[in-house]
Image (cartoon, grey):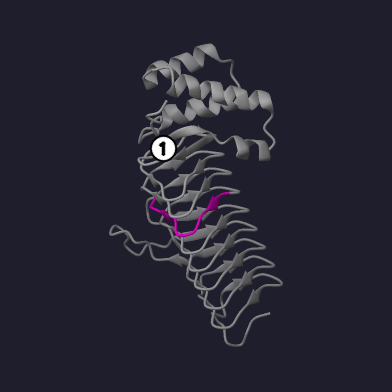
Amino acid sequence: MHSPLAVIHPEASIGKNVTVDAFAVIEKDVVIGDNCRIFSHAVILDGARIGADCKIFPGAVISGVPQDMKFAGEQTTAEIGDRTTLRECVTINRGTASKGKTVVGNDCLVMAYSHIAHDCVVKDHVIIGNASQIAGEVEIDDFAIVSGGALVHQFTKISKHVMIQGGSRVGKDIPPYTLIGREPIAYCGINIVGLHRRGFIKSQIFLIQDIYRTLYTRGLNNSDAIYAIETEYEPSPERDLILNFIKTSKRGIVKGSIDD
């Protein structure tokens, strides 16, 4: 059902069973999947690609022009996966020539007043808390939680199953399975509650804890810690994900707590 008070370009591609409320705006180069709900005063601009079963709440602006001085008007997109909810006044900018698109995956929840800048890649089952600000070209992997009011620096990488404390200023890469907090931010342990909820068994959780003890509490520098993890632990999906993340980090990983 489309309200007669909505502004919808006749060439926009809108799927079946989509509800568009009064005063929503949908521009020409837009694709919206089936069973979506577009609330009043949501604005969906050229370049938006929205999957099925999404909810876009009042005041959200999807596929706005990037806030990047290098942007020269190139044709780019902002792509939203299936079953994702974008709450009030969320802004998601489209990509630039750097990557060509901004991506938010499936089953995500982006809470009110949050911003996701150009060329970010936010994968599946991610939660971004109220008023968090995600700068350009940030990567956030599956099942990460960025709590409210966080500020994430451009080019930062946040790995899987991470929990970041509200109000954090994130300027370093965040390795998988970790709990991050304090000021300045630091490793505070592993995300045990999140791992239990997602079906990790005790042996997996113990292994992850032990690897991070090697990394953060044995007094080793990163190179020596990487060598110790490679030689002291058998290959496993958990070990290999941690190792690969540390090895490929360009910004460097978050430090350990001063209390460790």
- The location of residue 43, given as percent across then percent down, is 50, 73
- The location of residue 217, given as percent across then percent down, is 44, 21
Magenta stretch encompasses residue 191: no
Magenta stretch encompasses residue 129: yes
- The location of residue 89, given as percent across then percent down, is 48, 68
Depicted 157 relative to depicted 46: above or below:
above
Depicted 255 relative to depicted 142: above or below:
above
Q: Is residue 21 left or right of 178 when viewed as pictured?
A: right
- Between 74 and 143, the residue placed more toward the observer is 143
| Residue at the image position 67 percent from the left and 72 percent from the top | 18
Q: Is residue 196 left or right of 178 when viewed as pictured?
A: right
How many numbered badges does the structure rendering display?
Answer: 1
Residue type at tag 1: Asp
- Between 98 and 61, the residue placed more toward the observer is 61
Depicted 74 relative to depicted 198: above or below:
below
**Which stretch did the figure color magenta?**
126-136
